[in-house]
Image: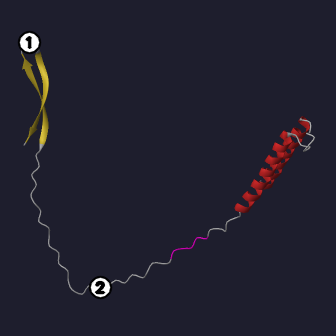
Amino acid sequence: MKIFRLVSGTAAALALVAGLAVAEPAAARDRLSPGAAVALGALGGLAVGAAVGAAVAQPQPPVVYRAPPPPPPVYVEERREPVYYERPVRERVYVEQCSTERYREWVPGWGWEHRTRRVCH
């Protein structure tokens, strides 16, 4: 893949240089048209950039994962003396028991109306 990119980039740069060199007539003093000079500069920059990129992109050594060391051994000591526990003291908790009652009430001028109320004991 890298070689394909390098070759295609070089071929594109050469095509650009050839196209610009043919498009304009050469100047008498330096024998290169301004477009060809720009194309040669771009091609040189591409070559230098490829060389620097290849030098920087050296393959890295593979990462090696090591297993962690085993945990230290665990020693269990038996207790010879008896252990006594105190029973926790429980406090009495009073819980309200509530229920909902439904009833009918006569409303003068209106009639029977269904109502609910909450009753707690």
Which residue is disc 1 drawn over? Answer: 109
**Dominant secondary structure, magenta:** loop
Judge from the rendering whether residue 65 lies leftward or rightward of residue 30; answer left or right.
left
Task: Tell me residue 38's x, y (percent).
Answer: 81, 43
Amino acid type of the residue tagged 1 in the rendering:
Gly
Residue 121 highlighted magenta (yes or no): no
Q: Residue at x 83, y 51 (%)?
A: 7
Who is closer to the viewer here, 43 or 29?
Answer: 29
Judge from the rendering whether residue 28 lies leftward or rightward of residue 70; answer left or right.
right
Compared to 109, does 116 lie above or below? Answer: below
Compared to 58, does 73 lie above or below? Answer: below
Q: Residue at x 80, y 55 (%)?
A: 3
| Region rendered in magenta | 64-68
Which colouring convention does the figure follow? secondary structure
Q: Quadrant of residue 87?
A: bottom left
Q: Residues within 10 Å of mark 1 (few under 14, many from 20)?
A: few
Q: Earlier in the sequence, mark 1 or mark 2?
A: 2
Task: Tell me residue 101's x, y (percent).
Answer: 12, 33
Work out which quarter of the rendered image holds the C terminus and state it: top left
Amino acid type of the residue tagged 2 in the rendering:
Glu
Judge from the rendering whether residue 5 lies leftward or rightward of residue 104; answer left or right.
right
Who is closer to the viewer here, 44 or 119?
Answer: 44
